[in-house]
Image (cartoon, grey):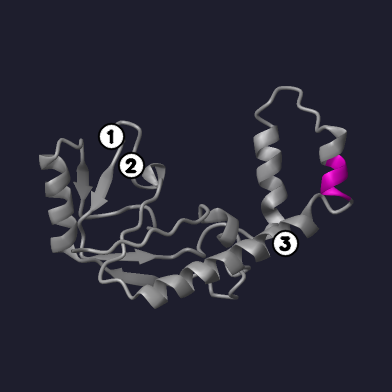
Amino acid sequence: MAELLGLGCSHGPIILTPPEVWHKGRSRIFGRILNYEAPAALIEELGDDNGLTEDRADQKKVVEAFGVLRDRLHQWKPDVLMVISDDQAENFLQDNLPPFCLYTGAQVDGFPFRNVGGENNVWGAAAETKFSFNCPQDFSRDVRNFLICDGVDMASSSALKGWD
């Protein structure tokens, strides 16, 4: 019988985006509210450096937490790693946005440092650093077929556009 290990983590931007630019995200979010004025308590909390000190501390905690997840994953030594994420907007257009999509391709290539921050990341990796992961196609197709037979409205794709 299969054994499962569930691990959860924060969405990628908090670990990939340098804390020095987090204030831009706050400005963008607050800018959605007409005539927004930051409450005095928030201004006080952000301090003289607009939250940079706290942002750096928060990212450090997240990086350490990812290290714990990495260690547990390596201890477990899984036969298969299934990643569940919410990256529909990175891989689909609004005219075809499935609620679930299972990747059935042979490999995933990623360039996580190309976007925000580039080489300014906690690992000091180059912007063109590429990660490649082999994917067990038979397993993913079997999971997809089982879910469809079980009545789940399931899409699949053997190609991703998100990292290009």
Quadrant for the C terminus, please: bottom left
Mark sitting on residue 96? 1
User: In this picture, is 129 found above or below 43?
Assistant: below
Mark sitting on residue 56? 3
Q: Secondary structure at mark 3?
A: helix
Left/right of residue 56 with respect to residue 79 in the rendered view: right
Give the amino acid type for the residue marked by disc 2 in the picture: Phe
The magenta region covers 43-47
Which residue carries the number 2 mark? 92
Whether residue 129 is visible here, answered yes or no, is no
Give the amino acid type for the residue marked by disc 3 in the picture: Arg
Main SS of residues in magenta: helix
Residue depicted at 34% across the width and 71% down the height: 132
Please state which of residues 114 and 44 is positioned toward the viewer in this rendering: 44
Of the two numbered discs 1 and 3 in the rendering, the one whose residue sits closer to the viewer? 3
First in sequence: mark 2 vs mark 3: 3
